Amino acid sequence: MLNQKYGVGEKAPRVDGPSKVTGEAKFTADIRLANMLEARVLRSPFPHARIRSIDTSQAEALDGVVAILTGTDLSDIDPYFGHAVRDRPIVAIDAARFAGDPVAVVAAESAHIAAEALELIQIDYEELPAVTTIEAALADGAVRVHDTDALRLGLFHGLGDFKPHDNICYEHHMTRGDVEAVFAEADAIVEGEFRFPAVYQYALETHAATAIWHGADQLEMWANCQHPYLVRAELADMFDLPKANVRLHVPFIGGGFGSKSYTRMEPIAAAMARKAGRPVRVVNSVTESMWTSRRHNMICRMRTAARADGTLLARTAEMWLDTGAYADNGPRVVATAADAAPGPYRWTAYQIDAYGVYTHRSPSGSYRAFGATHLEWIGESQVDQVARKLGMDPLEIRVKNLLKPGEAVRTPGKPMDADLIGDIRKVAEGLEWDKPRPPGVGRGMGIGLLAAGSRPVSTAFARLESEGTVTVMVSTSELGQGARTAMSQIVSQELSIPLSQIRVPDGDTMVTPYDRSTGASRSTTLAGGAVHLAALDLKDQLIAIAASKWQVAGSDIILRDGRAWVGDQSATLSELLFYHFGFSGGELFGRGIVRPEQGQGTYAAGPVFWEVCVGGVEVEVDEETGRIHLRKIVSVADVGTAVNPAMIKGQEMGGAAQGLGNAIFEEMVFSDGQLLNGTMADYRVPKMDDIADEFVSYIVQNEDGPGPYGLKGVGEGILAAMPAAIVNALADIGIHLNELPATPERVWRAIQQSKNV
Amino acid sequence: MLKPFVIHEPRTPQQASELLNEYGWDATVYAGGTELLVVMKEGLASYAHLINIKTISDIHTIHLTDNDAALRIGAAVTHRAIETSSMIAAHAPLLIEMERSLANVRVRTMGTLAGNLCFAEPHSDPAAVCMAWPGASFELTSTDGVRQVLPDEFFIDLFMTARQENEIMTAIHLPLLPPGMGSAYHKFVLLERPSVSVAAFVSVAGTTIKSAHIAVGSVGPVPYRATAAENMLLGQTPGDEPYRAAAEAAASAADPVGDLYGSVEYKRQLIRVLTRQALQQASERAMGVERL
Ligand SMILES: Cc1cc2nc3c(=O)[nH]c(=O)nc-3n(C[C@H](O)[C@H](O)[C@H](O)COP(=O)(O)OP(=O)(O)OC[C@H]3O[C@@H](n4cnc5c(N)ncnc54)[C@H](O)[C@@H]3O)c2cc1C
């Protein structure tokens, strides 16, 4: 099948499919270096403790133990990392700040021995009072998680100047108009306090990293990181190396969902390998990965005001997001949550106050559709509440208030770039909104926005070898989203060659050029944009060669079926290269650079694009047990142009399933800072049977995206829409929830409560 | 991570028992390994010697005994073998219902019914079903001989049974249900294993309930018989009202603790719902053509 040409818009088979189903595909933990040691991490049992002393002598004496890393080994480097706030040591230096915080690392001849050695390390802890909830961290006189005066900002916070204070890691405020004046004149006001749980991204592959030093100043690593160039920069900075001396390979990644954004286990592997003088591999268990990254739990208070005719007027939201012991991507998540709070509506006024809170819990970072997932269900449930108060239809109130293309969203910033009304009408169509609901069946919809794309800096090369094979060098990490297939299709489209002639190798910072990151739904739009430009560059060169070969104008040449044509004369790409170089050697390079243009350019105003987070569900509930049954999920992928409709549908189904998990199943349960459900037996993710009886998926192609062919990213929106749609569908049958997940017990309690009213 | 161990392959239950005598605390019985190996990998237990009972020849079959009045399920029989057995389908279809919803097909293919019972995990499906099953017993064999133990005596506490260190379970005995008796098993599952489960066996003669066996699983360390509920039903006419009353009694007999599976109040509610549903279905089956 890969022998076919699959251009843009076609359901190409995954180029990485065969290697993955046969087990050929290599993931980070599959990389084995000669002489490699296995590392295991000793983690703090306490949420907050001073480390008085560490005695490693017994562990060192164990046969097969090669080296042990503790905080005292880090004095000759800068041991702190954190791309937003540099608050996190490689291993605890003075104190452990969450139950699960790395305190020491053992490198041994086998993982077995390393694990055994962990038990022999004696640590004298002084347990300290801990703030393990948002409320405790915000209380007067609360213990401080960090000495904020000593904190430095990280290399890539991208949030202007800010200063953590008290237990507030970051705060973000947005204001429009005179909120209180508008509220005073409103006809309908709704308000509430809402809670969102801590959840785990649950990628199948846990975090892993392998490091080898070549001499004292060359570090080479394999890691399952989503953003290799950012990790490289942090490592270079910590170990005081030129960036070019840090080489990071990124093999296939077994799922990321944000859990592998930014720097994770790489510093531990690098520091351990440095101390041991041998290559080191570290692989997390599931529980350890749950401690490594999660989604922020949040408390939010929101008020929404409207006029009697259904015009939305004003909204206020105050929110506190628990970033755990380290900022990680918390500041960006807080900013994005604030940004998502108003929702996609035309407001006269709003006041949004968002805070990232340090607590003595495991750190929180990125997770697919962060911010939007936190806020959309809250904002959208208030829109429905307003509609109920005013006797309006939820579809009608949305159509009345949704932003139209070109209208300002936030100022400054990119105006609305999607047809939201068209999108929500599609949801209504899928839900058969106009048809009467069967008894006991609730329907709900949700729509929101996610500022997508991150920084628009991506580069790519396309290398055409003499046989006509194109190797696409691009640093997008393939984490199951299908990036390598999408990139291949773009090249196939432009050069008219089959997928079998196109390769997209692993990311490698020594070889594949700079890409800002793999996240924020940006890859096909931005890295794909760079690949597109690189392919066009190659195409131009090929056409010039063909024009010279046949002595015709370039405009007379077309590429079709893997050949260049003028009239009925044709030549393969390989023949053109032979002509160009005079023998069967030589290569061409295409170059693609995407960057923020000034003035009116495509990426002049952020975000790169507004990802539309829209969907709907139909549910029914077993009143006796509170169990929710999903009858239908409707997803609408507003993608501009679909490079591969089958992969988009996969993204929508996967995103919907994850959104369902966030909405009704998943919660990391902490008690006094200890994670109680750190295994998959106790942490409930959605299963196949849970998804829905029917999945209706629409793809909207208005060619209104900033990427090539008018495309824009996809994959996060439906996740954020799911909790909103579910909460609204429940409210539709009289079950009102202000806390997620909507577990059977919580739903049952809500039903009991509504009966008692 | 698994620490090294030696696997022994006895041919008879007696040899297995001898090995257990010989190695004492250092040894344990190894059947499908679906619980044991996980526990060992997690470092919660470690044994230098595993006594693989799958090499014992005559504990792999399911057959009728006691003049065809009971089923004997050998200790090495897997969940999957039960699920797909025509013998079980003909004589104890409730077990098939139970097996179909137990764990996943990989675990069922390796794991044994006896292993499940001997592990005595508090959320065990078979423990609840056996507890209610009229006349069920477990056969334990050692160098000291063979004995039959009733489920009620067998399950002592979480992960604790009446099995002696040198005994192996060799079979599970399940009498066939007499005519006029129906059975049902209902459970509520949210996490990996049931939050609450209820097994019910009801005999009906004419329009009168002659006997009722109800066991509630997953809410305590071991399943409990809801005896007050059972007694209330005797002599009653099958119907929603007596079942609701019995369900209420079963719920108030519970002594649940609040945990990840739910609060005390919610678990009581689940017991109420599942008991009523199980009684309803069991009595329908007792009275109907379907005999389960
Ligand atoms: C992912 C998963 C999901 C599961 N879900 C469920 C579920 O929903 N419901 C449920 O009820 N169960 C569930 N289980 C448990 C499953 O039923 C048991 O793992 C299985 O039946 C155990 O059988 P085994 O042969 O693998 O036992 P092993 O793991 O080999 O042994 C278990 C224990 O019993 C002892 N033992 C085994 N056989 C004998 C014997 N003949 N005599 C004496 N001692 C013996 C062993 O020494 C060990 O202590 C689940 C298990 C897993 C791994």
Image (spheres, coloured by chain):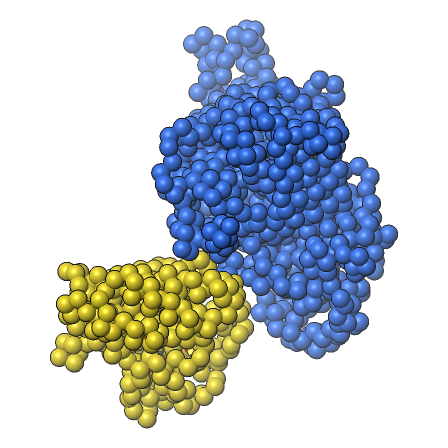
Chain colours: A blue, B yellow
**Ligand 1 image position (quadrant):** bottom left
Quarter of the image for residue A369 reads top right
Decide: is A664 above or below A581: below
Count the marks.
0
Quarter of the figure that contains the N terminus of chain A: top left
Q: For the view shown, which residue lies furthest in the bottom direction?
A: B144
Decide: is A565 above or below A466: above
Q: Which residue is drawn at 73% across and 63% down?
A: A130
Quarter of the image for residue A466 reads top right
- Front residue of A502/A296: it is A296
Taking the image as shown, residue B289 lies to the left or right of residue A348, namely left
- Front residue of A200/A272: it is A200
- Front residue of B205/B285: it is B205
Q: Which residue is drawn at 69% across and 44% down?
A: A319
Q: Residue at x 65, y 41 (%)?
A: A302
Residue A119: tell me if it is visible: yes
Taking the image as shown, residue A149 lies to the left or right of residue B119, namely right
Where is residue A183? Give x, y as percent.
69, 32
Taking the image as shown, residue A144 lies to the left or right of residue A744, namely right
Where is residue A502? Give x, y as percent.
51, 31
Q: For the view shown, which residue lies furthest in the front direction?
A: A757
